[in-house]
Amino acid sequence: MNTKTNLTPESWQYRDLNERTPSLSVMADTLIELADQGYPIAAGTADLQHSNGLVKFANAYPDRFVQFGISEQNMVSAAAGMATTGMIPYVATFASFLGLLTCEQIRMDVAYCAQPVRLIGHHTGISMGFYGTSHHATEDISTMRAIADLTVVSPADGAQFRQLLLESANYPEPIYFRIGRGHEPAVYSENEQFQLGKAKVHGMGSDITIIACGMAVHGAKEAVAELNKIGYSAGLIDMHTIKPLDEAAVLEAVNHSRIILTVEEHNILGGLGSAVAEIMAENPGKARLKRHGIMDEYALISPPQRLYQHYKLDGLGVREIAEALL
Amino acid sequence: MSDITDISLQEAQSLEERAQFVRLETIRLIEIAKVGHYSSVFSCAEIFSALYYDVMSISDDPKWPLRDRFLMGKGHAAVGLFPVLADLGYFPKDWLDSYTRLGSPLGDHPDMRKVPGVDFSSGSIGHALSNGVGIAMGGRMQEQNFDVFVMLGDGEMQEGQVWEAAISAANHKLSNVIAIVDRNGYQLDGKVDDIMAIEPLDEKWRAFGWEVHEVDGHDIVALTSILRRVKADKMREKPCCIIAKTVKGKGIDYMETEPGWHLGYLSPEDSEKARQTILNTRISGDPQ
């Protein structure tokens, strides 16, 4: 609750973030749910408990929450150590730091040591908007995907994130989750089921199938609906798990569609588009490929919604990209 | 009444023999690899011996949840740890004969996925104290009272992550984390204090909120005594750092005096001479 006096109700400060953006709470709520069920869940963050909502977990399970301060590398290495004692640590910070600054700790201490740490890179892609390049994460899929034995997951919305988080409690391998800032429009209903490693196929189009992940799924879904409305046969695959990639779903699309369009809030180098390209290069089918995302550049700054328009990651933009191919 | 920190002559002899064993086995294993970190092990042979054969609470089961943990930031000294773990029965002794050969579990750095008894893998210098901090936190969350010993190289003090871990161990009052700095004075490119000076090291650790002790890392009685004392101290509210003053290459004169032995190889003939030198080194109770 706000205790500020002499301010109008529209004013707010950092600690109000969690109340202002309820979908930010998906992570903490789900972890609390798992801990309540008896899973040995621990959580940690690096001075971002209000930004990622883990403050709720900290309040519910103070003895199982670790505030690491601004020391992301220590956090990741410590989480790996903690996992050896039987805890399941979920550590969260901005994806720009987790996916790049702590890349080596993730490789050595988490993935190579096969510890069931769950790394949650939030505010990924360009969702930090005008905070600029230091806070943008358009390389994290690429770095994480190159690490052996690490599962890489990019949920489309809060409902999917929740389901995949629940599944993660029993998942034997380390996971990197790449999530947004909690403002993502809903794609799925609350109880829709998903499986790590298994793409959510919304349909195959004989003209075009879009393969998207993360926040881009929403825009892609809108685009597909529009394309079908105007007479094309368009399909959509939500590739929430980028590694291990659901190759069967990709190959089905490659043999069904004229065009495969990948859409991601990430550099087109190394991300989902690259993963799909690798499969297509080794398994030639009838489809040709177009990768769409951030075109190997540092994004401009602006409020995020405007950035999504600019980089054609919203429904209209994805449709434009698709129509130009058709 | 005897104090727990009193080390009997018999205990001292036995621990010195185990340190000698570590050095001899290191020479033997490096003959297989034809390259290795003799001098890095020779500086911490007594630390291995004191911890594994006296101080740490361990059992026959290398996965016993309540065991004390040992981690090392200077993972390149693993060639000295493997013989100890085999000697404790954690894996068959003949694994040692495969050291560094194709598919062997035993390489230059310790791998927890492959080697029973290795509490955490290492090789990337600077991670181990963080790993130890996390282990201590996990133990605390589950009300398990074990101690976490983390041996660090002195060159490792130059890694920023060490100090992230140090500040967090103090902040979270992880009094069961005991760091041991193998202060042998040398790193790969030369003298630590020429490459990137780290002194005053004791003041640095104190300033980061740690209790600090200094000890001669080759004096088995003094070393074991201080390790027993800090392990037994349940009143301490902060983590503890022991700066072990050591000599890189301890026991082999040319390794002690010539820089450059961080990595090297001794021919079979020179290995045999080194073995004899070590066997002839006086231990407690030997005639003066």
Image: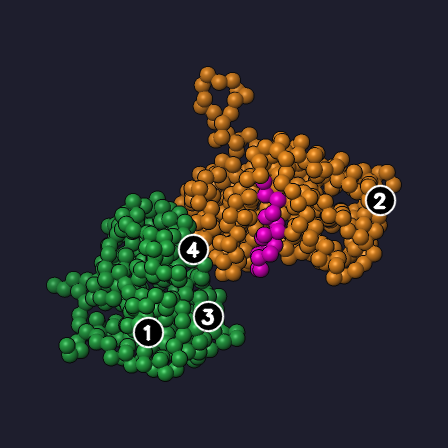
Residues shaded magenta? A136-153
Chain A shade: orange
Q: Residue at x 14, y 77 (%)?
A: B288
Is-magenta flag for residue A256?
A: no
Q: Mark 4 points at which residue?
A: B127
C-alpha distance separating marks 4 and 3: 18 Å
Which chain is indicated by disc 2? A
C-alpha distance separating marks 4 and 2: 51 Å
Which quadrant holds residue A222?
Answer: top right
Q: Which residue is drawn at 37% across and 76% down?
A: B27
C-alpha distance separating marks 3 and 2: 55 Å
Q: Mark 3 points at which residue?
A: B107
Provide the secondary structure element on which disc 3 rests: loop
Which quadrant holds residue A128?
Answer: top right
Which chain is indicated by disc 4? B
Provide the secondary structure element on which disc 1 rests: helix
Sequence order check: which comes first, mark 4 or mark 1?
A: 1
Which chain is indicated by disc 3? B
* A143 shown above or below A180: below
